[in-house]
Amino acid sequence: VQLQASGGGLVQAGGSLRLSCVVSEFISSPAVVGWFRQAPGKEREFVAAMRWIGGHTYYEDFAKGRFTVSRDNAKNTVYLQMNSLKPEDTALYYCAVHPQTATVIVESSRGYLYWGQGTQVTVSS
């Protein structure tokens, strides 16, 4: 398993969850680790991401101020801390790795080569 996401669950509105994504050592030189989500009947959308080198972070507008991406280098793990959760945050959340390429469009899922299995986040009102 090259990417393993975990940490989803059921939480009330206003609550918090922390998702984890373990990046296998067999994925060499990733450019970006991203988080995406897909709600039933909707397209997959970008949530947040972090540059593997340097740690620069990116957030979709709905995630700014509520979600935080961080990384534990020793554990090769990237986290998505989600606070002030809303019912509209309910979705299957995926972590993904974008390899080093000439062009990296962080917000587009097309460039991500490796995908985790997804972890369900359900926010009740």
Image (tube, grey):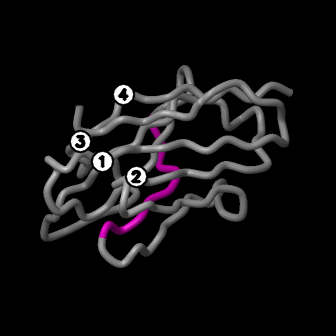
**Does the magenta portion include 97?**
no
Q: Are discs 1 and 2 less than 8 Å apart at CB?
A: yes
Specify which label sits upstream in the sequence, 3 or 1: 1
Categorize mark 1 by other alpha carbons within 10 Å: few (<14), some (14-19), many (20+).
many
Q: Amino acid at mark 3?
A: Tyr
Residue displayed at 43% across by 29% down = 118
**Does the magenta portion include 51?**
yes
Write down the region rendered in magenta. Answer: 44-52
Q: Amino acid at mark 2?
A: Thr
Give residue 99's position: percent from left, percent from top: 18, 57
Q: CA distance from mark 3 to mark 2?
A: 15 Å
Return the mark for residue 103. Answer: none
Q: Are discs 4 and 1 less than 8 Å apart at CB?
A: no
Q: CA distance from mark 1 to mark 2?
A: 6 Å
Q: Quadrant of the C terminus?
A: top right
User: In the image shown, does 84 or 28 lie closer to the viewer?
Assistant: 28
Residue displayed at 55% across by 21% down = 40
Badge count: 4
- Secondary structure at badge 2 equals strand
Return the mark for residue 114. Answer: 3
Per the image, the residue denoted by label 1 is: 23
Residue displayed at 55% across by 51% down = 80
Return the mark for residue 77. Answer: 2
